[in-house]
Amino acid sequence: MSEVIRKSITLLTAIKPNEEKEEWSATEISRKLNIPVQTVHRLLVSLEEYGFVFQNKETKKFRLGLTLLQLGLSIRDNLPVRNSSLPVMKKLWDQTRENVYLTVPEGDEGVLIDCINSQQSLKDAAPIGLRFPLCVGASKKVILAYMNTGVKQRILKGLMEKGEIKDLKNLEEDLVIIQKCGVAISFGEIKEKNVSVASPIFSWEDKVVASISVMIPDTRFTGSRIRDIIGFTQRAAEEISEELGWIKRR
């Protein structure tokens, strides 16, 4: 049974839509995964039964089904941190008119779970569900910086083993600075010519559970706007944290 599950998950991942392709034939999937076409057919039939894949009756090709979207949205919509963050994200967008993101940790990655995009930066907007290691980008680093020491060291070790960290000493120095400042700033780490400013969000247990960030083209990150963006972002993070029951240390 575990082998069937593994193959099913591999298949679903393989037919994820991209700019060039949205639908796949069983033969194409078979070649891509190096799995016999008969096995691919059996998996597709089972997955289609539950709505995890959908077959276009005209082309006979398959794509991801909307059941996956429903499951993903049900998880996202019931996250307390997201529900508490939405009005504050809107206020932060009103203040900055730039892309505003909400990121949560999952394992050694940060996952973008919601955003409000600026019309003037729409082409640079990151898609919901985007994942990056916690060592890349302000919205992820600020979460890593505030994790407890044991968890942080375990994640750093794992990312080192995966080859995600090029300079551990430099990263650890960055994390110390981020924790002292209460804000992380990255330049072009996720998207070229863009600056990201992020602050941590805490639960009532004083545990970092997310980050809120603003992404802005580097041409607009100048002068007094730097101070304003940082201040707005930090206040937004504190407001969400307080909504979750966090008490700021004096």
Image (cartoon, helix red, strand yellow):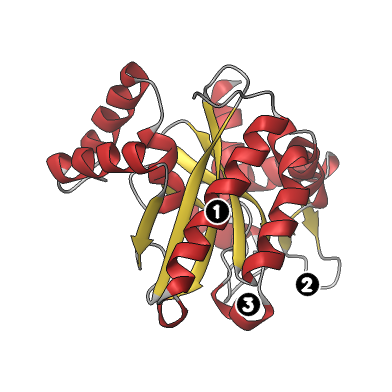
Mark 1 or 2, closer to the camera: 1
Look at mark 2 in the image and give the residue it sits on. Answer: 59
- Identify the residue at image location x=81%, y=51%: 66
Q: Earlier in the sequence, mark 1 or mark 2?
A: 2
Mark 1 to mark 3 CA distance (whole Å): 20 Å
Separation (CA) of disc 1 from disc 2: 48 Å
In the rendered image, is residue 34 in sight? no
Q: Amino acid at mark 3?
A: Leu
* Type of the residue with mark 2: Thr
Q: Amino acid at mark 1?
A: Thr
Percent x, y of residue 38: 63, 46
Q: Which residue is mark 1?
A: 233
Q: Which residue is mark 3?
A: 122
Q: Residue at x 58, y 16 (%)?
A: 205
Q: Position of residue 165 (x, y in %)?
A: 22, 45
Report whether 93 appears left or right of 250. Answer: right
Residue 216's x, y, as percent? 50, 71
